[in-house]
Image (spheres, rainbow, N blue to C red):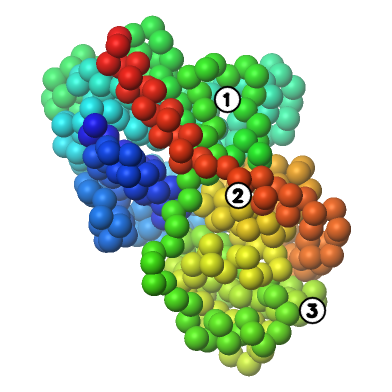
């Protein structure tokens, strides 16, 4: 079966799980094609997976001056950044929609994120099975917990359900004029009405597949049987990968360090973050490894207790560290939890805060240390979280126990079984 997998316009962490899924589908005899932003072409092709472009470079847009405050800005600065992001996305959307149509025309099954909800029309036009997939439970209404994409606390069954409905409306009401024109001129199908339900097709709910572990967040009893949280989808490192000699040397010359990495997006103030980490390490008495990535952070010389790396293979490194400090992105979170090491989440966004709170509730890490507002993100707060993570017996045991459970899961196997079942249902309908 030819399966088109559309990825969300996001960072590498949004693409990597779906590359792992494509590899497993290929092993099972399917022909996957992975549709992703332009910056991920070589990343996907190096794994011998067919790639189709989506004409957008999210890292470039979010790294622009106009959008720079999207994650760590506040007040008017953040609102202006959100407007700039919406304007940039609106400008790219006609090309993106044409790209996903071109990549999907020969597909027998379509997998897409809720951020690309117009793919519903492609599946309907081609009369092929469709599956919505995401790393966060964003489109399944429940009273068990509030919508992760909103900064909201548990407010009881009724209000939790309404928070999910609000998110679904936000996700599926955007850019309707562009979508209508695309339906009319490109797909040659009836444009959607304002009240179009994008979570249903032919009177039946569209299957939803989430790539996170039920060990971290159990599936609620009020979800229907067409929804599955399969477990994480891990992309194993390439054969022959070797750490740098400098990294191995640093690891060999002292106690296990604490890892710091805040994602692949440029930081609004990389040097402040750098100084804050160094101060937190000094106060906690721990050694550290800092992943520079695309943050714009500069190496600070003269600190023997810290080592900087531009790119690090997380699944190799994390079993060798004492604790993992990161922003709470789904990819880094998954590998950190699998390693069985305490996790300290320093979130920018609502869903990252949600995951950080889940980690804490399972005693796999201390309370999150938010990076927004910036005045609350201090060396003292981070230092205290580090001290708690590496010394609290309940956290050390909670992280180890959760790691064992996640290592015993095979999320990719469950995901492929779910996809095959939906394809079979489509054949028989």
* Residue named by callout 1: 164
Q: Which is nearer the eye, 309 or 252? A: 252
> What residue is shown at x 43% (from left), y 28% (from top)?
418
* Residue named by callout 3: 285
Disc assigned to residue 262: none
Count of numbered labels shown in the rendering:
3
x and y, in percent, of residue 356 in the image: 68, 48
User: From where the camera sits, is residue 317 visible?
Assistant: yes
Residue 285 image-quadrant placement: bottom right
Q: At numbered mark 3, what does the secondary structure look like: helix, strand or loop? A: loop
317 up-or-down from 140: above or below: below
Disc assigned to residue 407: 2
x and y, in percent, of residue 242 in the image: 45, 76
x and y, in percent, of residue 122 in the image: 24, 25
Q: Which is nearer the eye, 358 or 158? A: 358
Instruction: State the CA–CA distance, disc 1 to disc 2.
Output: 30 Å
Is the residue marked by circle 2 packed among few (<14), some (14-19), or many (20+) residues within 10 Å?
some
Q: At numbered mark 1, what does the secondary structure look like: helix, strand or loop? A: helix
Looking at the image, tell me whether mark 1 or mark 2 is earlier in sequence order: 1
Residue 306 image-quadrant placement: bottom right
Q: Is residue 255 left or right of residue 161?
A: right
């Amino acid at each position: 079966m030819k399966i088109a997998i559309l990825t969300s316009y996001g960072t590498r962490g949004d693409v990597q799980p779906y590359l792992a899924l494509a590899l497993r589908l290929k092993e099972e005899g399917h022909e996957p094609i992975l549709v992703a932003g332009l910056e991920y072409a070589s990343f996907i092709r190096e794994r011998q997976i067919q790639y189709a472009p989506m004409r957008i470079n999210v890292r470039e847009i979010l790294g622009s001056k106009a959008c720079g405050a999207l994650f760590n800005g506040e007040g008017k600065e953040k609102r202006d950044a959100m407007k700039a992001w919406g304007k940039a996305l609106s400008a790219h959307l006609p090309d993106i929609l044409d790209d996903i149509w071109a990549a999907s025309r020969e597909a027998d099954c379509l997998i897409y994120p809720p951020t690309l909800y117009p793919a519903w029309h492609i599946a309907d036009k081609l009369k092929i099975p469709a599956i919505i997939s995401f790393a966060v439970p964003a489109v399944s209404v429940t009273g068990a917990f509030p919508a992760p994409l909103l900064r909201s606390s548990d407010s009881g069954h009724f209000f939790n359900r309404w928070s999910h409905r609000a998110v679904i409306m936000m996700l599926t009401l955007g850019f309707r004029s562009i979508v209508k024109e695309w339906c009319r001129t490109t797909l040659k199908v009836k444009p959607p009405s304002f009240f179009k339900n994008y979570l249903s097709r032919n009177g039946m709910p569209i299957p939803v597949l989430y790539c996170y572990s039920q060990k971290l967040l159990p599936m609620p009893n009020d979800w229907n049987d067409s929804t599955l949280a399969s477990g994480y989808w891990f992309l194993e490192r390439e054969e022959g990968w070797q750490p740098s000699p400098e990294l191995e040397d640093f690891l060999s010359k002292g106690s296990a360090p604490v890892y710091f990495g805040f994602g692949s997006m440029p930081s609004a103030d990389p040097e402040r973050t750098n100084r804050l980490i160094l101060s937190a390490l000094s106060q906690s008495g721990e050694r550290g490894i800092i992943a520079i990535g695309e943050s714009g952070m500069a190496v600070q010389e003269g600190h023997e207790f810290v080592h900087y790396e531009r790119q690090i293979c997380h699944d190799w490194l994390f079993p060798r560290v004492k604790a993992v400090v990161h922003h709470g992105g789904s990819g880094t979170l998954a590998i950190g939890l699998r390693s069985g090491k305490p996790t300290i989440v320093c979130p920018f966004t609502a869903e990252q805060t949600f995951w950080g709170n889940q980690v804490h509730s399972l005693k796999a890490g201390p309370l999150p240390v938010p990076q927004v507002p910036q005045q609350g993100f201090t060396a003292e707060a981070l230092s205290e979280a580090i001290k708690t993570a590496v010394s609290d017996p309940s956290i050390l045991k909670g992280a180890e126990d959760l790691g064992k459970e996640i290592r015993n899961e095979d999320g990719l196997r469950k995901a492929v079984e779910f996809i095959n079942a939906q394809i079979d249902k489509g054949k028989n309908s």
